Image (cartoon, rainbow, N blue to C red):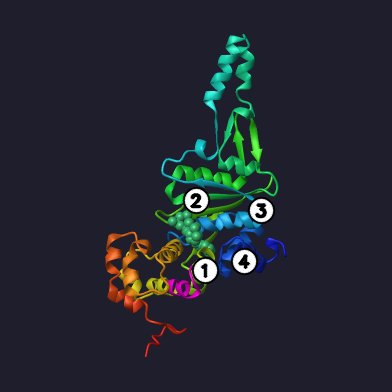
Amino acid sequence: MPPVQSSIDALIQSLERAGYFADRRLATAVFLALKLQRPLLLEGEPGVGKTELAKALATALGRVLLRLQCYDGLEQREALYEWNYAAQLLHLRAAEGSGQAAQAEREVYQERFLIRRPLLQALQAPEPGAVLLVDELDRADEPFEAFLLEYLGEYQVSIPELGTVRAGAVPVTILTSNRTRDLHDALKRRCLYHWLDYPDRDRELAIVRNRVPAAGERLAAQVAGFVARLRSQPFASAFQRAPGIAESVEWAKALVALDTLELDPEVVTDTAGILFKQREDVAALTRELAGELLQPQDEGGQDIRP
Ligand SMILES: Nc1ncnc2c1ncn2[C@@H]1O[C@H](COP(=O)(O)OP(=O)(O)OP(=O)(O)O)[C@@H](O)[C@H]1O
Ligand SMILES: [Mg+2]
């Protein structure tokens, strides 16, 4: 088995063994991020496999995955480190009792009172290093983004009481965004960029078959074909939000649970709440439309029903 990083093909295969199906463009972006030791910024619609890529990459590379979930108000102490005040206080109290307060005051800034958060853990991960996932960065606020910029530039952190911590092995860093706001150019410049699109029918079929082996060949193919058509024009414009891969996988599981062997308009509309999470979208998927979407297709997308 060739090493994961020896070629783009080897990387595609290792990701596939980890259950992740990447197309060549994505694999090229990941390959370059590894070779150039640059962070990779992944943007894309919900449920297209941004988070999952980081997980699969960690498995493929045999690295530990460290995940920082971003949200509005995320602060450095939750991302980087904080001192364990409660433990420090207890240590001081105990020392007071035994008359060693002065010594205890010096001791409270030892590493054992440090709580390491993902960004610090990523610098100190043992060989071969970590995969660091900074997930949904668009949800964090701009000061945090500025702080992250500095971190990504140097992969080192200064802890006033302890000194500078440098990365042993540079973490493989994946940043994701759903683009609820634009990230700063300065941050983007630091990263390689990839827009993760919906998969084509064949890749989605591979994913559904892999994730839901209980779905027969025919049902899996119908699910992949149906969702691919749903996302294409003119059908896509009938909906506010197209289903992601996560929804296709869930849908296939639901259909298996309902003992469905083959799609028909009725089962499609009955299970529309799995594909869509908006009331209007569920309503837009009428039986007529479902029937139209289920028409058999040839390779060129033409209706081949006699
Ligand atoms: N390329 C892929 N190969 C295998 N499974 C995939 C792939 N892409 C997505 N999936 C499946 O879709 C699910 C959702 O993917 P994921 O959570 O990574 O999406 P996301 O882009 O991070 O979405 P969000 O923006 O909502 O966080 C995964 O749990 C996985 O089952
Ligand atoms: Mg995600």
Is residue 277 shown in magenta? no
Question: Marks 1 and 3: which is nearer the front?
Answer: 1
- Separation of residues labelled 4 and 2 (CA atoms): 22 Å
Q: Residue furthest bottom?
A: 306
The quadrant the C terminus occupies is: bottom left
Q: Label 3, secondary structure: give it.
A: loop
Image location (x, y in percent) of residue 21: 56, 66
Residue, disc 4: 12
Image location (x, y in percent) of residue 302: 40, 85
Q: Main secondary structure of the magenta part?
A: helix
Residue span colored magenta: 215-224
- Separation of residues labelled 2 and 3 (CA atoms): 20 Å
Indicate which disc, 1 or 2, sits on the residue closer to the N terminus: 2
Marks 4 & 3, CB-CB < 8 Å contact:
no
Vertical order, 48 against 89 (above or below): below
Question: Marks 4 and 2: which is nearer the front?
Answer: 4
Is residue 217 shown in magenta? yes
Task: Identify residue type, mark 3.
Answer: Gly
Task: Identify residue type, mark 2.
Answer: Asp
Comparing 285 with 83, the one in front is: 285
Residue, disc 3: 62
With 177 as the anchor, is 54 left or right in this view?
A: right
Indicate which disc, 1 or 3, sits on the residue closer to the N terminus: 3
With 142 as the anchor, is 103 left or right in this view?
A: right
Residue found 34% across the figure and 61% down from its top: 273
Residue 135 is tagged as 2
Badge 3 density bin: few <14, some 14–19, many ≥20, Cα 10 Å: some
Question: Marks 1 and 4: which is nearer the front?
Answer: 1
Image location (x, y in percent) of residue 39: 58, 54
